C-alpha cells in the first residue's frame, strides 16, 4: 500500500532564496507528523508544494502514490491554510457547502459532510452565522472544517492556531486529537513547541528550508542532549560581563538568560561558585529537562521564536 | 502639528498609486478628451452626412444639389456606396427614407418634381412643391443645420433666380418697369446667368441671409411614434457605463479571494482556473444583464419606453453587452494586483471609454477621429445596438454586426484574462 505522503529531495527557490532545500520525508498511515520551525523556515512552502500550489524546482511529492496536484491527490488531501480562507459574507454552512461543491460533493453526501464538519468544529449552533461575525477562534475552527469537507485521508494543517486565545487553541487541539484518534494521517506545522509535543508522533525540525532533525520528541532530545539537563540562570550584572563569562563556561546567553548543559545536577554548585568568583550577582537559577526548544537552540543556536 | 498631519497624508497619498492616479491623471485625461471633442471643433468640424435625391432634374435643382455638394460642412450622397466595386443606382425618395431609417445618414433631402419652376419665394411658403427633409430626430443637430444650409445654398448658388424673382415682385407691386428699365434688368440677369454658368454655380454668398427662400417640409422618419424618444438612448448609454463599473467590481472578488487565500483553497479542490474564471464571468454577465433589465423596465414604467415590443432585440443586445462587460471586468481584475489598483484603473478606463464611446454624450457630436476611436469601446457598439432595437425598430437579424463585435471582444478579453490569471495558478 502506498504511503499517505512521500516527499523526496524537494527543492523550491524564489529568486535567490531557497525556501525548501532538498527535503525528504515519509508519513506513515495514521501518523501525525509535526513540522516545527521558526517563521520563514520553509514549512508553508513545503505544505504548498504538497498541495500542488507551488511547483517545485526539483524533487517529487506523492500522495497515496499519486503525484501532487493530480486528481487523486486532490481528492485524498485536505488542506487547512494558515490564512482564513473563507467567504466572510457567507454563513458557516454556506461556506462548507461551497467548498464541498468545489470538491464535487452534492445531495445527501454534501449534507452529511457539512453536518459532520459543523459538529467536529463545534459550530452546529453557529451554522447560520455569517463568518465575518464569528470570533477569531470560531473562524479558525471553520477554516479547519472547510479543509475536511471532502473527508480526505491525509490532512495538512498549516499553523491552524495562529492568533487564537488559549481556550480556542485547546478546542482546536481536541479537534485534531479526535481526528488523529480516528486514524487520520496528519501533517501539522507550527512554531509552538508545546503544540508539536502534544499533538505529534514524530517531529521534523525545519530551518532554512531543511529538516535538521526528525524523530519522536524523546529521540530528538536524547540525540541532542543524551542524559544531560539544562541549567538556566539570570544575573544582575552588566550584559557584557555576563556574556563573556557564559561564553567562557561554554554556555549560551539568550534573552538575558544564561543556559548550560550539565551531566549531573551536582555540577550546578560549581557553576554558581564560578559565577560568584567572576563577580556576577545571581538573581535566580533553575534546572530542567531539555525540550524541543532546547533541541532547536542546540541545533541552530537560535530560539524557535526568532 | 498640522504640518505633521499634512506630511503624513502626503506620504500616504504618494504611496497609494491608485489614489494618486485618480487625483492627478484622471482629471488631466478627462480634460484632454473633452478638449479634443469640443475644443478643436473650429479646426475639424464634423461633416454631416446628407442624402440628396433630385427628382426634378431641372437647372435650378441641379444647381442646388451642386451647391450642397460643395458645402464644406456637408457630406452629400446621391447614391449608396458601391457594393463589391459595383456602382449603385441613385437614391430614390423611398430608398433615401429607408437609408435614414437604417442610420446611413441622419437627414435626406428630396428635391421634388416641379421644384425648378418656382424654386424660391420671398413670401415664406412658395407656390411650388416644397423640398422634403426626412430626418432621424435622434440627431437633433444635423436636421437643423441642414435646414439652414439649404437656405444659404439657395442664395449662393442661385443668385440669378433670386434676382429674377425679385424683379417680378418689383414689377408687380411698384407699377411696372419702363421698357428701358426692363431691358437693363434682362441684361443684368443674363450677365448673372453667364457668370453662374462660368463659376459652376458656386457663388461665394454675401447676400442677405433670408431664411425661408426655399420651402421645406420636414418629417421624422425614425422615432416619429416614440413617446419619449431619447430615453432608450440614455438607458443604453448610462446603463453600459454602470455595467462596466459593476462588472469590474464583481470581478474584483477574484482579488479579494487571492488576498485572503481563498483562491488557493479553491484551486486546491477540483476547480481549475479556467472553470473559476468562467464561473466568475457567468456571474458578472448575469449581474450586468439583470442591471440592464432593471434599467429598461424602469424606463418602460416611468418614462414610457416601448420595452415590450422590443424584448427579443433587448435580450440579444443585453446578453451580448453583458458578456462583453463581464469579460472586460475579468480582464481588469486579472491585470491588477489589489482592489485599490482595480478601483483606480477601472475608474480611469471606464470613464475614458464612456466619454469617447457615447455614454456621456452622443457620438455624432464628436469629431470624426473621436467617433472612430469610439468604435474601440464596448460602449459604442452596445449603444449602437440598443439604438437599432429601440430607436430604429430594426429586427433582431440586423443586430449581427454589434452582436458579433461584442461577443468577439468578450471572447478575446476573456482569453487575455485567462492568460494573465496564470500568475495565480502556481508559485
Image (cartoon, coloured by chain):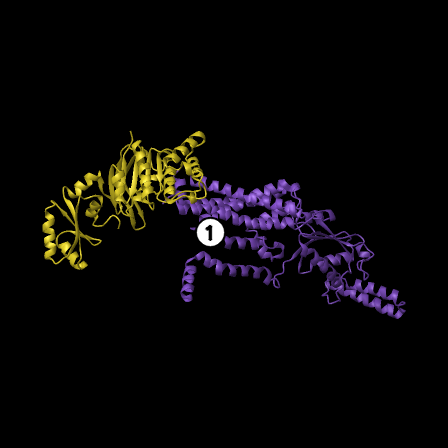
Mark 1, Cα crowd under 10 Å, few <14 / some 14-19 / many 20+, is: many
Q: Colour of chain A?
A: yellow
Residue A56, visible in the rendered structure: no
Does residue B46 appear to the left or right of A1 in the view shown? right
Q: How many marks?
A: 1
Does residue B38 appear to the left or right of B19 in the view shown? right
Q: Based on the displayed image, in which of its 4 quarters is residue B70 positioned?
A: bottom right
Question: Residue B281: x, y in percent?
Answer: 49, 42
Q: Residue B25 versus residue A55: which sits nearer the camera?
A: B25
Question: In which quadrant will I find the C terminus of chain B?
Answer: top left
Q: Which residue in the structure is indicated by mark 1?
A: B342
Q: Which element is circle 1 on?
A: helix
Residue B3, visible in the rendered structure: yes
Question: Residue B375: x, y in percent?
Answer: 57, 51
Q: Residue A114 versus residue B222: which sits nearer the camera?
A: A114
Q: Chain of mark 1?
A: B
Question: In which quadrant will I find the N terminus of chain B?
Answer: bottom left
Q: Colour of chain B?
A: purple
Q: Is residue A209 above or below residue A239?
A: above
Q: Is residue B28 above or below residue B273?
A: below
Q: Residue A247 versus residue A2: which sits nearer the camera?
A: A247
Does residue A74 appear to the left or right of B121 in the view shown? left
Question: Residue B90: x, y in percent?
Answer: 71, 49
Amino acid at each position: 500500500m502506498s504511503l499517505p505522503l512521500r516527499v523526496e529531495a524537494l527543492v523550491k527557490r524564489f529568486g535567490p532564496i531557497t525556501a525548501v532545500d532538498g527535503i525528504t520525508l515519509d508519513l506513515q498511515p495514521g501518523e501525525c507528523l509535526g513540522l516545527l520551525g521558526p517563521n520563514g523556515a520553509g514549512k508553508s512552502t513545503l505544505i504548498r508544494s504538497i498541495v500542488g500550489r507551488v511547483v517545485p524546482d526539483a524533487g517529487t511529492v506523492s500522495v497515496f502514490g499519486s503525484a501532487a496536484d493530480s486528481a487523486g491527490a486532490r481528492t485524498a488531501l485536505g488542506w487547512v491554510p494558515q490564512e482564513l480562507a473563507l467567504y466572510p459574507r457567507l454563513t458557516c454552512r454556506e461556506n462548507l457547502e461551497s467548498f464541498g461543491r468545489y470538491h464535487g460533493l452534492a445531495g445527501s453526501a454534501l449534507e452529511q459532510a457539512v453536518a459532520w464538519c459543523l459538529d467536529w468544529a463545534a459550530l452546529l449552533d453557529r451554522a447560520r452565522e455569517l463568518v465575518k461575525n464569528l470570533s477569531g477562534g470560531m473562524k479558525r475552527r471553520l477554516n479547519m472544517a472547510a479543509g475536511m469537507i471532502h473527508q480526505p485521508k491525509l490532512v495538512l494543517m498549516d499553523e491552524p492556531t495562529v492568533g487564537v486565545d488559549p481556550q480556542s487553541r485547546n478546542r482546536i487541539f481536541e479537534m485534531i486529537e479526535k481526528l488523529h484518534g480516528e486514524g487520520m494521517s496528519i501533517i501539522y506545522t507550527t512554531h509552538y513547541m508545546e503544540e508539536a509535543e502534544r499533538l505529534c508522533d514524530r517531529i521534523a525540525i525545519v530551518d532554512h528550508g531543511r529538516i535538521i532533525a526528525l524523530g519522536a520528541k524523546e529521540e530528538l532530545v536524547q540525540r541532542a542532549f543524551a542524559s544531560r539537563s539544562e541549567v538556566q540562570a539570570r544575573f544582575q550584572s552588566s550584559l557584557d560581563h555576563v556574556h563573556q563569562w557564559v561564553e567562557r563556561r561554554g554556555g549560551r546567553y539568550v534573552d538575558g538568560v544564561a543556559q548550560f548543559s550539565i551531566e549531573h545536577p551536582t555540577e550546578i554548585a560549581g557553576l554558581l561558585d564560578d559565577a560568584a568568583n567572576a563577580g556576577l550577582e545571581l538573581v535566580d537559577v533553575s534546572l530542567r529537562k531539555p525540550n524541543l526548544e532546547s533541541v532547536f537552540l542546540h541545533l541552530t543556536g537560535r530560539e524557535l521564536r526568532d | 502639528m498640522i504640518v505633521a498631519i499634512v506630511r503624513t497624508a502626503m506620504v500616504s497619498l504618494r504611496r497609494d498609486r491608485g489614489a494618486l492616479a485618480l487625483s492627478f491623471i484622471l482629471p488631466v485625461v478627462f480634460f484632454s478628451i473633452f478638449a479634443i471633442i469640443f475644443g478643436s471643433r473650429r479646426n475639424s468640424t464634423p461633416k454631416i452626412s446628407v442624402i440628396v435625391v433630385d427628382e426634378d432634374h431641372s437647372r435650378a435643382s441641379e444647381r442646388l444639389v451642386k451647391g450642397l455638394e460643395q458645402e464644406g460642412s456637408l457630406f452629400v450622397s446621391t447614391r449608396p456606396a458601391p457594393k463589391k466595386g459595383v456602382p449603385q443606382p441613385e437614391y430614390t425618395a423611398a430608398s433615401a427614407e429607408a437609408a435614414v431609417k437604417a442610420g446611413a445618414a441622419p437627414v435626406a433631402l428630396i428635391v421634388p418634381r416641379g421644384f425648378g419652376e418656382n424654386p424660391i419665394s420671398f413670401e415664406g411658403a412658395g407656390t411650388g412643391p416644397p423640398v422634403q427633409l426626412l430626418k432621424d430626430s435622434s440627431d437633433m443637430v444635423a436636421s437643423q443645420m441642414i435646414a439652414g444650409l439649404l437656405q444659404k445654398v439657395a442664395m449662393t448658388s442661385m443668385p440669378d433666380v433670386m434676382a429674377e424673382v425679385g424683379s417680378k415682385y418689383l414689377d408687380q407691386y411698384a407699377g411696372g418697369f419702363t421698357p428701358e428699365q426692363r431691358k437693363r434688368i434682362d441684361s443684368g440677369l443674363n450677365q448673372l446667368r453667364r457668370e453662374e454658368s462660368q463659376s459652376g454655380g458656386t457663388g461665394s454668398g454675401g447676400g442677405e441671409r433670408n431664411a425661408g427662400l426655399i420651402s421645406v417640409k420636414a418629417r421624422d422618419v425614425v422615432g416619429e411614434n416614440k413617446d419619449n424618444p431619447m430615453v432608450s438612448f440614455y438607458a443604453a448609454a448610462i446603463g453600459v457605463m454602470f455595467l462596466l463599473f459593476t462588472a469590474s467590481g464583481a470581478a474584483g472578488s477574484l482579488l479579494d479571494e487571492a488576498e485572503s487565500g481563498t483562491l488557493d483553497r479553491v484551486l486546491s479542490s477540483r476547480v481549475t482556473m479556467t472553470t473559476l474564471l468562467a464561473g466568475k464571468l457567468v456571474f458578472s454577465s448575469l449581474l450586468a444583464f439583470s442591471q440592464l433589465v432593471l434599467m429598461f423596465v424602469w424606463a418602460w414604467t416611468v418614462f414610457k419606453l416601448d420595452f415590450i415590443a422590443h424584448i427579443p432585440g433587448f435580450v440579444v443586445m443585453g446578453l451580448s453587452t453583458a458578456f462583453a462587460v463581464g469579460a472586460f471586468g475579468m480582464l481588469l481584475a486579472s491585470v491588477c494586483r489589489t482592489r485599490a489598483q482595480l478601483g483606480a484603473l477601472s475608474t480611469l478606463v471606464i470613464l475614458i471609454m464612456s466619454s469617447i464611446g457615447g455614454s456621456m454624450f452622443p457620438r455624432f457630436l464628436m469629431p470624426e477621429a473621436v467617433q472612430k476611436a469610439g468604435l474601440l469601446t464596448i460602449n459604442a457598439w452596445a449603444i449602437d445596438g440598443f439604438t437599432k432595437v429601440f430607436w430604429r425598430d430594426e429586427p433582431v437579424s440586423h443586430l449581427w454586426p454589434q452582436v458579433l463585435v461584442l461577443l468577439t471582444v468578450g471572447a478575446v478579453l476573456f482569453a487575455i484574462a485567462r492568460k494573465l490569471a496564470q500568475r495565480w495558478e502556481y508559485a
